Amino acid sequence: EHHPAMTSQGYSPYAYLSGSQSQQQLPPPRPSSTSNSSSTYESQGNHLIIGKCMFCKSQLCYPQAVKVFQCVTCDTINDLIPAPGAVPQEPLTLVQIQQALERAEEQRTETGGELDYTELGTLLREKLRKFGAFNSIFSSGHPITYEHCGVNLEEARQAFSLLVAMPNSIALAVMTSVEAILKRPGKEIKDKEDLKFIMLMFECPWLTRHRTQQESEYHHNITKRLFTIISNLPSDLHKYLSSWFTNCLSTQIFHNRINFVNKFITQRLSNQQKSTDRTQHIIYQSDPRIQAAARVMHLFFKANQPNEKDLPEFGGKNRSGEDFVIVPFSKDSATKSQKIPIDEYYNMIVDLIELPVDFCAWESRSAMFTFCQYPFLISMGAKMQIMAWDAKRQMEIKMQKTIEALVMQKRLRASENGGDATGITLLTQAELQQAPLLILKVHRNNLIEESLTQLSRNEMDLKKSLRIEFVGEDGVDAGGLRKEWFLLLVRQLFDPQYGMFIYDDQSQYCWFNPASFESLDQFYLVGVVIGLAIYNSTILDLPLPLAVYKKLLNIPVALEDLATFRPDLAKGFDQLLNYEEGDVENVFCLNFVGSYEAYGENVEVPLIPNGDDIPVTNHNKRQYVERYANFIMNKSISDQFESFRRGFYLVCGGHALSLFRPEEIEFLVRGSAEPLDIDQLRSVTVYEGFNDEHEVIKNFWSIFKEFEDKNQRRLLQFITASDRYPATGIANLTFKITCMGSHDSNHYPTTHTCFNQLCLYNYRGRDKLKNMLVRAMNESEGFGVK
């Protein structure tokens, strides 16, 4: 007898299997929903209960007497009482496969016929018949921990590499077993021992095969079942999987797994976009398979961030607990770097959806799936488009409020002068032009103080487009004056003599000066300036390490971050942590005291109460390193950094910022560190007095191209004031070369960095041009000469 069943929201066609039905047998047909289904069940003495599918977690309603049912959402058969699935006495091993292949070869030698893999196919069907049997193959013999998954992955890869070269009958033997298990696992996957099956599925080479349309659809359907199960596993099992992806996969294999998941997402999105029947078209928000794949990708993303813990959704503003620094327990355990750069997660098809709509749904915390929940799938360029759209939206709101305020002021002035204010509803053209702008009027000789004063006075207008006027100078800001203001301001604020930042000669990075005499308002100004640079698409040559951007997003910093800008200190910590040869107290002679230099004097600060009387020993050396690193990166600069953070968030505060990773924020501020594409730069260059076929120009590009990367960047910095190109790419870089005269000259080339303009004379000969360029870029600094 077949019973209709219901979802928790209403009646739905639903079928279940009796316990006697075999795994291979299809479920009975699903009956149509009826409005009196519930009363029918009650009248028959069947009580309905509400539960969840074990595999997709959909809320379902089914008769209490049912022991097996098929989910209407994911189509997976649920066994409420685990189905029998005994593990064979001898699980499948690589040796068994090799022996079966050897016997097939011997049989061919004896008979002179073709290779017969019947025995191998029978072996595979027998050993892979049930979930428990498949889960036990290629065991490593190690207990399952966060570092060991219990599967000998190398043996599994060798076995699969042998099987994938076999005829289709062997592939069919494996994949029909896989399909049957995924359709009916026979039990709920809730123990870490059950995850061996998942790790083996990722090793299965047939899932990435797409030689024909039919094969592609078959493997896609298997993959969607796999991702559905993985995405809905309990969080403690997700932690095991993520840890195994970190510890058990090489960089290349990890990269392949990322591509595997991304191709699945791409295929589903592409199929949706190709759909011509809009009535049948399922948008991605309601496609649970895309959401499942995104969740699986999130596990790989977390595996790529081994030093980070789970973070709050919106930039981490509500994170509880004190700041800390992640310090490795040993040289080999952590801190681990990323396996792959973040751009390998980007999915270009995702960039084609209506991202502002997606962003609004995510921002409103809608219950529907959005890609902004998984921003690592969204490319840098698309995120910048979202940020630009969000900034434009916020500026339009500000502009409307400004216009309304200006109209109100005009009405008040008219009323005060005895005129009629009721008719004033519009602004003049000049007033309308100024309304969406933030205009700063500053003197060059008082740049910091006047900039700080005016920015503080206009805190509500910082998201408006920025325009600069230098008092006493003619000129309309078409972008050049704004860039010059940024350059001058940053040079003064980051000047070592100004004392706000301390520099490390080895790393060439700077850090906040805990002993700075400057007011906290100056650090606030630095934060505002960086935020303004992002909103106004201006690259700043800031030698700030990645740790600054991590702290801005409330992502814990690690000892490896300290090594970036204080390599000598971090090296000393590493030596201390890994010292095992004797007594740390007698060899290192350290106490729990941190220190920093304050204008030539050494200032010591206890890291713990009475720290100057507590020696560092073999037992507490890790605590010492944690406290000292935390002192350098957090506690000693807390006031300065909080002022800096306040200024930054005043401009960039908003949900769009939290879509970015720290390295992406650094990319926005400093530009790309990727190798320069000289040909692409040449294609966007504008000439004045020259053309692309002029001998000087040909020589210039030839010289530029033959330079090593270091000198290419030095020349780019000489021309643009930055050795990097914009986050939007070289195609969006303005680059101009101007002729300074038709005759040869012994004068050096000059530049106008505010306009990315290089001024060349008509130098005779390639060697002279090269010599002049090298001297100019090596001996110039800022607007002057060393």
Image (cartoon, rainbow, N blue to C red):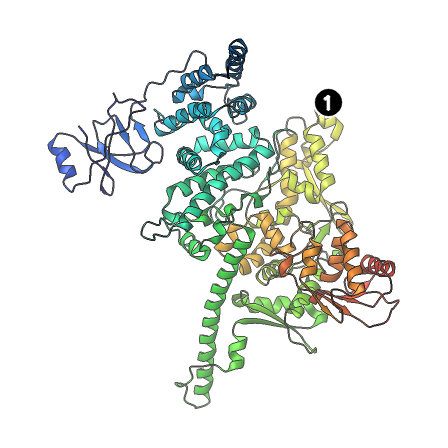
Residue 616 appears in view: no
Above or below, comparing residue 629 to residue 47 in the picture = below
Q: Quadrant of residue 605?
A: top right
Find disc 1 in the rendering and name its residue.
Answer: 581
Above or below, comparing residue 666 to residue 227 in the picture = below
For the point 64% across and 45% down, which residue is it?
633
Above or below, comparing residue 625 to residue 191 in the picture = below
For the point 52% across and 72% down, which residue is it?
436
Furthest toward the bottom, the residue is: 418
For the point 31% across and 38% down, which residue is it?
73
Above or below, comparing residue 728 to residue 104 in the picture = below
For the point 51% across and 11% down, which residue is it?
103
Residue count near mark 1 (Cα–Cα under 10 Å), binned few <14, some 14–19, many ≥20: few
Instruction: Point out residue 202 in the picture as x, y percentages from the top left corner.
Output: 49, 30
Instruction: Point out residue 249 in the picture as x, y percentages from the top left corner.
Output: 57, 30
Furthest toward the top, the residue is: 110
Instruction: Point out residue 416 in the picture as x, y percentages from the top left corner.
Output: 45, 87
Furthest toward the front, the residue is: 112
